[in-house]
Amino acid sequence: MTQTTGITLYGIPNCDTVKKARAWLTEQGLAHTFHDFKKQGVPAGQLPGWMAAVGWEKLLNRQGTTWRKLDAATQAAATDAAGAAALMQQQPSVIKRPVVEWPQGQVTVGFSPEAWAALAAR
């Protein structure tokens, strides 16, 4: 069993950004755990913490294909934290990816090699 450094990356395996992020972590020699939203769902206990850390507006991906396919009523229901949280639980693909929990307790959304290098160096 591989020891993890406490990095957990949440996302969808076929997402290009998630693929880049996982490759970057591996290239840096940073052990990490991957949580697949498609197979494992969104951990309900984590979602409030992510929303508190980065804001529900940043976590909800309104640019993606999944969002654009939603009907207007469903989109309209996601105009506050509670509505967005319910939608993210039901449709994990509307969460901006990847979500990463770092060993020091930080939460990041999206992939930024520069920002990640700074977090990994701590």
Image (tube, rainbow, N blue to C red):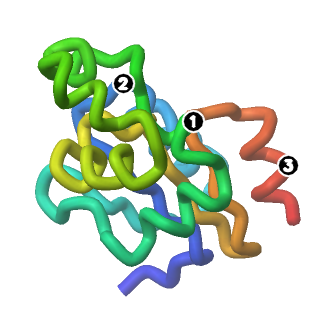
Provide the residue designation for mark 1: 58
Residue at the image point whose x is 19% and y is 61% from the top: 41
The numbered disc on residue 16 is 2
Marks 2 and 1, the one that precedes in the sequence = 2
In this picture, residue 16 sits left or right of residue 93? right
Identity of the amino acid at label 2? Answer: Asp
Please tell me whether mark 2 sits on a helix, a strand or a loop.
helix
Mark 2 → mark 1, Cα distance in angstroms: 19 Å
Instruction: Please indicate whether residue 30 sits to the left or right of residue 40 in the image.
Output: right
The disc placed on residue 106 is none
Classify 116 as above or below 8: above
- The amino acid at mark 1 is Lys
Q: Amino acid at mark 3?
A: Ala
Relative to 105, 88 lies left or right: left
Crowdedness near tag 1: few (<14), some (14–19) or many (≥20) residues, C-alpha within 10 Å: some
Residue holding disc 3: 118
